[in-house]
């Protein structure tokens, strides 16, 4: 049997990190996405004082994912496989609901008023 040819390490790094770097560059330039997003969300939300909800929600969701990842690692490393699988099935979903419930005050704080939605 012949071994599979290996990629050049520099090419492998470029293929792995290139899309990630392109993603970060594109996200650092919000004007690149504005023509696509503008028809989907109201102008008052996109550029007004309510725009903070998108940033706040993104930060909150990152915190949720990081917290669940850390908790998953702790359970995986310290418990048996059966306990870990039970945690993944019956523990992660309720925790996700708890995190969603905790986000409610954030959403109500940044909610657009009815005046903003109608544009008057």
Image (cartoon, rainbow, N blue to C red):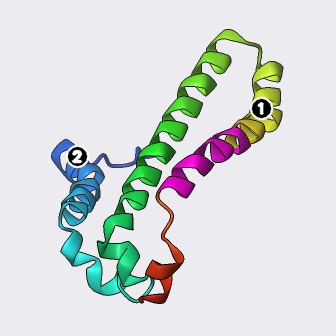
Q: Nearer the viewer, residue 67 or 16?
A: 67
Q: Which residue matches tag 2?
A: 13
Q: Nearer the viewer, residue 1 or 39?
A: 39
Q: Quick check: 27 above or below 35?
A: above
Is 10 left or right of 95, judged from the image as shown? left
Q: CA distance from mark 2 to mark 1?
A: 36 Å
Q: In the picture shown, does residue 9 fall above or below 76?
A: below
Secondary structure at badge 1 equals loop
Above/below status of 58 relative to 66: below
Queried whether the magenta region covers residue 95, the answer comes back as no
* Prevailing secondary structure of the magenta residues: helix
**Residue at image location 42% in from the left, 88% down from the top:** 119
Name the front one of labels 2 and 1: 1
Q: Earlier in the sequence, mark 2 or mark 1?
A: 2
Image spot of residue 77 (x, y percent) = 62, 14
Closer to the camera, 36 or 99? 99
Most distant residue in the top direction = 78
Position of the C terminus by quadrant? bottom left
**Residue at 77 percent of width and 14 percent of height:** 80
Q: Position of residue 26 (x, y in %)?
A: 22, 66
Q: Could you say which quadrant of the image residue 38 lies in?
A: bottom left
- Seen at 51% across and 64% down, the residue is 111
- Is disc 2 placed on a helix, strand or loop? helix
Q: Position of residue 78 (x, y in %)?
A: 66, 10
- Residue 26 falls left or right of residue 1: left
State the image coordinates of residue 19 (x, y, percent, origin top left): 28, 59
Proximity of marks 2 and 1: CB atoms separated by less than 8 Å: no
Identify the residue under disc 1: 91
Dot 2: few (<14), some (14–19), or many (≥20) neighbours within 10 Å?
few
Query: Which span of residues is magenta-colored?
Result: 97-109
The residue under the point 41% across, 46% down is 59
């Amino acid at each position: 049997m012949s071994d599979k040819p290996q990629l050049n390490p520099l090419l492998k790094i470029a293929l792995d990190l290139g899309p990630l770097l392109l993603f970060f560059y594109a996200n650092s330039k919000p004007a690149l996405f504005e023509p696509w997003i503008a028809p989907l969300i109201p102008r008052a939300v996109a550029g007004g004082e309510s725009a903070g909800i998108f940033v706040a929600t993104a930060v909150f969701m990152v915190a949720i994912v990081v917290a669940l990842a850390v908790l998953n690692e702790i359970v995986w490393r310290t418990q048996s496989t059966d306990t870990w699988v039970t945690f993944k099935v019956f523990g992660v979903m309720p925790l996700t609901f708890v995190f969603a419930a905790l986000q409610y005050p954030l959403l109500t704080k940044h909610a657009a008023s009815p005046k903003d939605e109608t544009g008057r």
